[in-house]
Image (spheres, grey):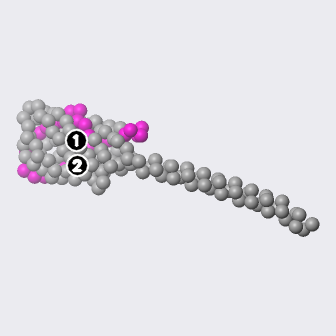
């Protein structure tokens, strides 16, 4: 009689363990899918306006909007500071930036290494490539002003409202 009562209990325990194993397998599969989604690189672009001046020291300030293909967007402030042999004043209007190597929009904020050679009078065009660890940013735009020289420094992107 003792054996007969043990069999249903064993069947019940086996069913309970099987259900738990399949639930944990399902949870692990969902977690892996979530991790794969997090590891996927996003394509992000930035539209911006930037005003600059330089006399050995170069300073630029502006604002823009970043939009990513995963639906994330952010309004941003841009600051660039550096130095070199550089003179002038210029504006970039409706500039465009393309980011690569990011998984989330928050990875785009921070300081990028910058080097540039520039020369322009009246209407001009500019292009730059910047890096921050594994993330790259290419900038292009048209503007107006007078400037000439070369400069090195940092290009910082922060969320609007942050300093």
Q: Residue at x 11, y 39 (%)?
A: 89
Q: Is residue 82 visible?
A: no
Question: The N terminus lies in which quarter of the figure?
Answer: bottom right
Question: Which of the 4 image quarters holds residue 15?
Answer: bottom right
**First-in-chain label (1 vs 2):** 2
Q: Position of residue 114 (x, y in %)?
A: 19, 50
The magenta span reads: 68-97
Distance from Cα at disc 1 to Cα at disc 2 = 8 Å
| Left or right of 85 in this view: 19 | right
Q: Which residue is mark 2?
A: 130
Question: Which of the 4 image quarters holds residue 61?
Answer: top left
Residue extending farthest to the bottom is 2
On residue 10, the disc is: none
Q: Is residue 67 visible?
A: yes
Magenta highlight on residue 82: yes
Q: Are marks 1 and 2 in contact (CB under 8 Å)?
A: yes
Magenta highlight on residue 117: no
Q: Residue at x 89, y 64 (%)?
A: 4
* Viewer-closest of 93 and 15: 15
At label 1, counting other C-alpha atoms closer than 10 Å, the crowd grade (few under 14, some 14-19, many 20 or more) is: some
């Amino acid at each position: 009689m003792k054996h007969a009562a043990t069999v249903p209990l064993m069947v019940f325990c086996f069913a309970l363990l099987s259900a738990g194993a399949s639930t944990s397998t399902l949870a692990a599969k969902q977690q892996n899918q979530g991790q794969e989604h997090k590891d996927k690189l996003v394509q992000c672009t930035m539209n911006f306006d930037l005003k600059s001046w330089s006399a050995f020291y170069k300073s630029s300030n502006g604002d823009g909007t970043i939009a990513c293909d995963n639906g994330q967007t952010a309004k941003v402030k841009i600051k660039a500071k550096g130095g070199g042999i550089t003179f002038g004043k210029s504006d970039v209007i409706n500039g465009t930036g393309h980011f690569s190597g990011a998984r989330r929009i928050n990875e785009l904020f921070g300081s990028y290494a910058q080097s540039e050679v520039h020369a322009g009078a009246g209407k001009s065009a500019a292009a730059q490539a910047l890096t921050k660890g594994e993330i790259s940013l290419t900038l292009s735009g048209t503007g107006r002003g007078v400037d000439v020289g070369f400069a090195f420094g940092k290009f910082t992107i922060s969320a609007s409202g942050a300093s």
